[in-house]
Image (spheres, grey):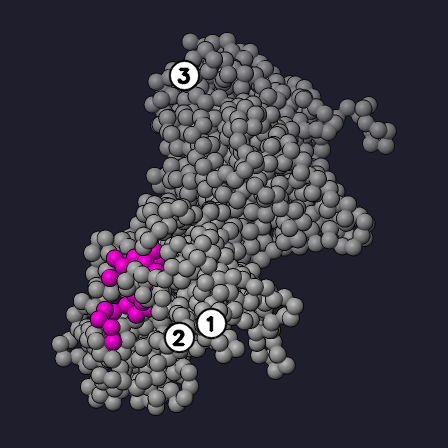
């Protein structure tokens, strides 16, 4: 019997019979779903994937959003406040209008988790799981311990101080980072089953690296930089010289600070800005911040900008801190050993003959600034106690990208490595070290590099409506006194709205464009999320490979690849 | 490749939208007309009867024994679609059936050869939605100029050469002619704004009486652009002002899609090989380019397409995506 | 009881008795009175149908096509240029196998312009794939229209009922109109299985490639041939209901043993029958009315002509450059007979030229000629011809 279709009167055809004709054979390219890495994700030192948690919040699933967030960073309430948000600098949305205020959403989720009492989505390790050690309960050590737990290890965390938190506790003013938030997140972390915290344990004094290596399957060093960078001007050191970091810690621990009428703070980092603001709060008439760099975002060349957060600098200026940019302290004016003023000059960092940037003062620009005190806040260095062998005379502990310190199973991160100057970077160091240690000991694949990146060229801007970034509210200057947090943070509505501004770079937005615009109906929609995180599937029986879906995908989630 | 937990055929049966056209049709890659027809049939739903003129839409969907149509469908000839639709509508009325009759034709079948039948259908007040898929030339026969081909466009019967810059005559203002029938509802739409298109289809179907929809549908082959750029080209047509999206009721303009930031017409033209000769280094080419720019500006003035400020339904806002699309149902 | 009716009016009333659901109408002489009369029936509430006044014959046919495809009983009428204008659609209607009924009020073709009767229009669409039935009288026209609707829906083929323009359409005479119940009993409610229906969607009018087009044509051809049975049955059933038998595919009058036959289509048959009565001195003649031109009644024709020596085919159309149309087919059909009559071909009555009693002896003269008449126009006025043709 032939199975040829027989003609009907008039050549009538049955509805939908064309389904038997598979146009997929026409195709030379096929569309595929490619979860490209959002630039914010790529830029986040802590390894957060903001795209993922913004999407979940946009879908009104805040707890899952928080869980996606703390998969990488256990301290979002902290970083949402203190991070310079590398993510936002990379955000594709800034090409369209303004970057998504990712830090606001991060902070909102962090605070919401504390308010709701959400527990970390971490399973307790087995009671007899091997144990790893982290020295220093700052952000790096906390992160290492947390991620070790996530990977099935037990962790033991040592710190010289009675409380965990590191610089978050010792150097960040409470008006930026309220203690309730820090305590809430740190305590939640420390109370995780399998994590053991040992305070009052001074590395190099109460125990050493050898002890640790004997008792632990791996060691992470996150001791931070404890010693102020030496500072003097032409050998003159005033008798009442205080280091900025010490003053800040004093204020944070005891609420006390010397009162000055006119004071010069030297340095352009967050410590000097924080200190300047604390001094202003303590009643100083004039607080000068002297930096050889320019204000944030106003530099003349890379490296010519104050490393402090732009937002903090702006608030310091609002509060009356006088920032003297492109200036340096040339000479101290002393009466006896007491400072009565500083001579400042115009100063810039310029390349010398070998190309190294060096500070250069310009003769003939000297000015006298009468002050009661000068406070250097020009950075800190490692306290080498117990680390002599590892440091081998270097100011910082050299590690590879994973934090491997080149010795047995010793990893390190945070301020110690000389690269990571922020809480967020420290958290990332701890995370990567835990993953690398895990990969090495378990002999499993290390984490995959983040690629490809969904750059702006992958985005189809036609599909996004301009939408202004939220304006964060800040207390008026008159009310910025004491320790009260000056930024109340976003409302739930604001956070949701901001999440809705996310372009969803590199990941399906479930917008229906591919489903709606396929002339061949080769894109099917699924009621549930599919394995690749999208709601759509290509029917290659019919897809002709025209590429329309890829071009009209707003977020670069569809890529065309050659068939042959 | 994506691993899918359920067989595709099952998933296809469970799709949230009824579409009057199935896959397996033979339209070119990235065909704007099939996309437009797909969107129209989705908005119209299953309770329709379609009369279809000769053209790409017909030959690509009904290669016996295959048919891509899931709704009752008839093709008779090129120029008589409106009359066939009139007959169907009269029959439904006589039988007290309530299905909506849709007439589908291209621009050749509407602006030119089928115009008389269309005019008659409207004049007699048949309850038919007539959809013209406008790809601005006779594509099915190999890209010959039609009454809809814009001035300056090269086709195989209006080629560009030493003495000619493509078509020498203006695109026929079909909508005004249609509207002059004291038409209850006539509108233009485009594949670049599916939500707007759906809205207009539904509106046109609600009206008891003749309604007309002109859907700008890029033809990758005939216009000379990659099939992946069909929607992009259509969008530029609107954003430049050359393709005004308007609604007319009883001849009066009752709705327009404002243009937020008019794009230069050159952006639209450059995307298509049929206008390539307008970018030659000659005074004539420059003048014709300015002519098209002036036509776009005239549209903007005539229909008041300049938007005072951002609006959700203007040329920038109307295609904004939302996470979650239209949800499932 | 007979009513005095004009032919067009009678046809309109007959059509109305068939309860058409959609009538598409466009005026053209001499058809116009038919659609005018239907319009009046609708206006008076005597006929409940969708009456669509289209803007051209092309649309008249197309509208009827659409209506029929949607499952309605559909009707239209035309003539002459209108037939040519809709000819594209006629081929499509039959090719799509959509049943409907069309009246052709036969009229000559332009140019030069002539509004008067001949059958060039329906002959021009001979190959359109329609059933063509020719009526010899207005009474036959009434009855044939009623039969046509039944034939159409049984065969899913369109039926063209040909009625000589003016000669029949504009002639007032006493006619029997059947009762509505009689028609209703004869003509079942309309049903078209392949109708456009959202509940059972079909695709009508596909593009058929070389792999199947011949088979579609074969199917169409055989459907037409098979329609002969439906025509015969409709004729017989209507004869039983009405008492009037129009012979089915063809019919003959005159002595059964006559050796001469005259074959024609339409109203001239009546004239020839009258003439035969008035000329008993002339040789006995069988007068054959070809009722069904499509399907062409090969067997019936062979049977009725088997014993003839001479057959004159007289037709009201011409195929310039060849001459005969109907006669050419008759010759071909009879050539299969073991002893075929000689077939003579003439045209008469073109462009409304009157056919009178005087034609009859002229036709018999042709039959008795030594030479077979291949083709000529028999009623030429030599004085009107250019000199070089008048010899």
Residue A270 sits above or below residue A13 on the image: below
Confirm whether circles 1 and 2 share one chain: yes
Please give the residue where the numbered disc 1 appears in the rendered image: A336
**Residue C178 marker:** 3
What residue lies at 34% left-to-right and 18% top-to-bottom? Answer: C181
Image mark for residue A540: none
Up-down: is A397 above or below B21?
A: below
Magenta stretch encompasses residue B16: no
- From the image, state whether disc 3 or disc 1 is nearer to you: 1
Q: Is residue A278 left or right of residue A327?
A: left
Residue A360 in sight here: yes
Residue C252: x percent and y percent? 51, 28
Instruction: State the CA–CA distance, disc 1 to disc 2.
Output: 25 Å
Quadrant containing the N terminus of chain B is bottom left
Which chain's residue wears label 2? A
Q: Position of residue B197 (x, y in %)?
A: 48, 40
Q: Nearer the viewer, residue A270 or C210?
A: A270
Same-chain check, marks 2 and 3:
no
B299 or A165, which lies in front? A165
Q: Which residues are magenta?
A: A159-183
| Disc 2 to disc 3: CB gap under 8 Å | no
Q: Secondary structure at mark 1?
A: loop
- At a point 53% along the width and 31% down the height, the residue shown is B255
Name the residue rendered at 62%, 20% in the picture: C29
Measured in 3D between alpha carbons, the distance from the residue under mark 3 to the one under mark 1, in whole angstroms, is: 138 Å
Q: Which residue is mark 2?
A: A228
- Mark 1 or mark 2, which has the lower sequence index? 2
The C terminus of chain B sits in image quarter: top left
Q: Residues within 10 Å of mark 1 (few under 14, many from 20)?
A: few
Residue A260: where, in percent of width, then height? 41, 59
Viewed as shown, does residue A470 lie left or right of C338?
Answer: left
């Amino acid at each position: 019997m032939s199975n040829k279709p027989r003609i009907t009167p008039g050549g009538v055809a049955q509805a939908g019979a064309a389904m038997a004709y598979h146009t997929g054979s026409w195709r030379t390219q096929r569309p595929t779903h490619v979860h490209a890495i959002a630039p914010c994700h790529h830029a986040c030192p802590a390894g957060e994937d903001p795209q993922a948690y913004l999407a979940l919040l946009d879908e009104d699933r805040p707890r899952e959003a928080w869980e996606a967030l703390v998969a990488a960073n256990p301290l979002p309430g902290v970083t949402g406040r203190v991070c310079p948000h590398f993510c936002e600098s990379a955000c594709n949305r800034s090409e369209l209008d303004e970057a998504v205020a990712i830090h606001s959403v991060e902070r909102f989720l962090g605070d919401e988790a504390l308010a709701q009492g959400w527990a970390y989505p971490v399973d307790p390790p087995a009671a007899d799981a091997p144990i790893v050690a982290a020295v220093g309960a700052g952000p790096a050590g906390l992160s290492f311990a947390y991620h070790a737990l996530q990977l099935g290890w037990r962790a033991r965390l040592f710190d010289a101080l009675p409380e965990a938190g590191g610089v978050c506790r010792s150097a960040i003013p409470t008006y930026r980072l309220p203690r309730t938030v820090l305590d809430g997140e740190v305590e939640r972390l420390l109370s995780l089953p399998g994590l053991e915290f040992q305070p009052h344990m001074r590395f190099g004094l109460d125990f050493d690296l050898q002890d640790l290596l004997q008792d632990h399957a791996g060691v992470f060093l996150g001791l931070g930089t404890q010693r102020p960078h030496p500072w003097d001007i032409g050998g003159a050191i005033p008798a009442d010289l205080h280091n900025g970091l010490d003053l800040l810690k004093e204020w944070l621990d005891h609420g006390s600070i010397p009162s000055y009428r006119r004071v010069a703070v030297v340095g352009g980092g967050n410590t000097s800005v924080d200190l300047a603001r604390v001094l202003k709060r303590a009643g100083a008439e004039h607080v000068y911040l002297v930096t050889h760099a320019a204000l944030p975002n106003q530099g003349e060349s890379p490296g010519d900008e104050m490393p402090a957060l732009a937002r903090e600098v702006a608030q310091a200026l609002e509060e009356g801190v006088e920032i003297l940019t492109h200036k340096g302290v040339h000479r101290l004016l002393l009466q006896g050993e007491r400072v009565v003023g500083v001579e400042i000059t115009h100063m810039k960092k310029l390349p010398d003959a070998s190309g190294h940037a060096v500070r250069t003062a310009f003769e003939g620009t000297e000015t006298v600034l009468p002050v009661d005190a000068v406070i250097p806040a020009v950075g800190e260095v490692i306290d080498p106690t117990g680390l002599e062998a590892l440091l081998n005379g270097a100011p910082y502990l050299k590690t590879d990208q994973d934090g491997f310190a080149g010795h047995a199973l010793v990893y390190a991160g945070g301020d110690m490595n000389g690269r990571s100057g922020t809480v967020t970077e420290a958290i990332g160091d701890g995370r990567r070290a835990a993953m690398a240690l895990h990969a090495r000991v378990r002999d499993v694949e290390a984490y995959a590099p983040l690629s490809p990146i969904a750059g702006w060229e992958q985005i189809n801007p036609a599909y996004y409506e301009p939408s202004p970034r939220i304006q964060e509210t800040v207390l008026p200057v008159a009310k910025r006194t004491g320790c009260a947090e000056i930024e109340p943070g976003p409302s739930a509505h604001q956070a949701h709205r901001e999440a809705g501004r996310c372009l969803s770079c590199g990941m399906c937005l479930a917008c229906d464009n591919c489903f709606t615009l396929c002339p061949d109906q080769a894109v099917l929609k699924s009621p549930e999320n599919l394995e690749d995180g999208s709601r759509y599937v290509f029917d290659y029986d019919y897809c002709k490979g025209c590429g329309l879906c890829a071009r009209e995908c707003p977020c670069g989630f569809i890529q065309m690849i050659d068939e042959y | 490749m994506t691993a899918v937990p359920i067989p595709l055929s099952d998933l296809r049966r469970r799709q949230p939208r009824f579409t009057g056209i199935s896959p397996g049709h033979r339209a070119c890659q990235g065909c704007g007309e099939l996309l437009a027809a797909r969107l129209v049939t989705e908005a119209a739903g299953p309770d329709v009867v379609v009369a279809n003129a000769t053209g790409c839409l017909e030959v690509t969907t009904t290669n016996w024994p295959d048919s891509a149509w899931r709704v009752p469908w008839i093709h008779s000839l090129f120029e008589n679609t409106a009359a066939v639709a009139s007959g169907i509508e009269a029959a439904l009325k006589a039988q007290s059936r309530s299905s909506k009759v849709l007439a589908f034709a291209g621009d050749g079948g509407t602006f030119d050869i089928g115009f008389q039948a269309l005019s008659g259908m409207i004049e007699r007040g048949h309850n038919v939605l007539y959809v013209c898929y406008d790809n601005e030339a006779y594509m099915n026969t190999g890209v010959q100029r039609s009454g809809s081909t814009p001035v300056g466009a090269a086709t195989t019967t209006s080629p560009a050469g030493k003495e000619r810059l493509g078509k020498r005559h203006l695109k026929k203002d079909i909508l005004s002619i249609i509207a002059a029938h004291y038409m209850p509802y006539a509108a233009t739409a485009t594949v670049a704004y599916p939500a707007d298109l759906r809205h207009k289809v539904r509106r046109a179907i609600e009206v008891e009486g003749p309604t007309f929809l002109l859907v700008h549908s890029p033809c990758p082959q005939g216009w000379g652009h990659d099939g992946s750029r069909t929607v992009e080209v259509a969008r530029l047509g609107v954003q430049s002002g050359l393709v005004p999206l308007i609604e007319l009721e009883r001849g009066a303009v009752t709705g327009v899609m404002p243009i937020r930031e008019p794009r230069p017409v050159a952006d639209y033209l450059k995307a298509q090989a049929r206008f390539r000769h307008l970018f030659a280094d000659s005074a004539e080419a420059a003048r014709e380019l300015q002519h098209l720019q002036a036509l776009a500006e005239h549209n903007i003035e005539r229909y008041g397409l300049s938007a005072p400020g951002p609006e959700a339904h203007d040329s920038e806002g109307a295609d904004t995506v939302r996470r979650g699309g239209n949800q499932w149902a | 009881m007979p009513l005095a009716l004009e032919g067009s009016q009678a046809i309109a009333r007959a059509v109305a008795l068939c309860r058409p659901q959609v009538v598409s109408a466009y005026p053209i002489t001499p058809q116009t009175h038919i659609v005018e009369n239907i319009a009046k029936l609708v206006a008076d509430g005597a006929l409940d149908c969708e009456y669509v006044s289209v803007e051209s014959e092309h649309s008249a046919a197309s509208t009827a096509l659409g209506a029929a495809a949607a499952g309605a009983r559909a009707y239209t009428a035309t003539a002459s240029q209108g037939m040519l204008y809709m000819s594209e659609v006629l081929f499509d209607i039959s090719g799509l196998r959509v049943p409907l009924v069309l009246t052709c009020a036969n009229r000559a073709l332009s140019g030069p312009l002539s509004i008067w009767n001949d059958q060039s229009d329906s002959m021009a669409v001979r190959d359109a794939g329609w059933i063509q039935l020719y009526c010899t009288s207005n009474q036959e026209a009434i009855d044939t229209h009623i039969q046509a609707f039944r034939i159409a829906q049984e065969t899913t083929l369109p039926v063209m009922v040909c009625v000589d323009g003016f000669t029949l359409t504009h002639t007032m005479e006493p006619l029997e109109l059947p009762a509505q119940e009689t028609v209703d009993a004869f003509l079942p409610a309309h049903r078209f299985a392949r109708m456009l229906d959202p509940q059972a969607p079909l695709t009508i009018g596909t593009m058929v490639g070389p792999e199947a087009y011949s088979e579609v044509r074969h199917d169409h051809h055989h459907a037409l041939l098979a329609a002969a049975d439906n025509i015969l049955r409709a004729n017989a059933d209507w004869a039983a209901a009405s008492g009037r038998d129009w012979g089915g595919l063809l019919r003959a009058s005159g002595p059964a043993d006559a050796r001469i036959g005259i074959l024609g289509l339409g109203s001239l048959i009546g004239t020839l029958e009258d003439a035969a009565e008035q000329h008993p001195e002339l040789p006995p003649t069988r007068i054959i009315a070809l009722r069904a031109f499509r399907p062409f009644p090969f067997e019936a024709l062979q049977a009725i002509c088997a014993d003839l020596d001479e057959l004159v085919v007289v037709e009201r159309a011409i195929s310039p450059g060849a001459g005969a149309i109907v006669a050419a087919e008759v010759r071909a059909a009879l050539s299969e007979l073991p002893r075929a009559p000689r077939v003579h071909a003439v045209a008469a009555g073109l462009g409304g030229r009157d056919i009178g009693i005087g034609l009859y002896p002229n036709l018999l003269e042709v039959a008795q000629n030594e030479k077979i008449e291949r083709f000529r126009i028999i009623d030429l006025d030599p004085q009107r011809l250019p000199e070089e043709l008048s010899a």
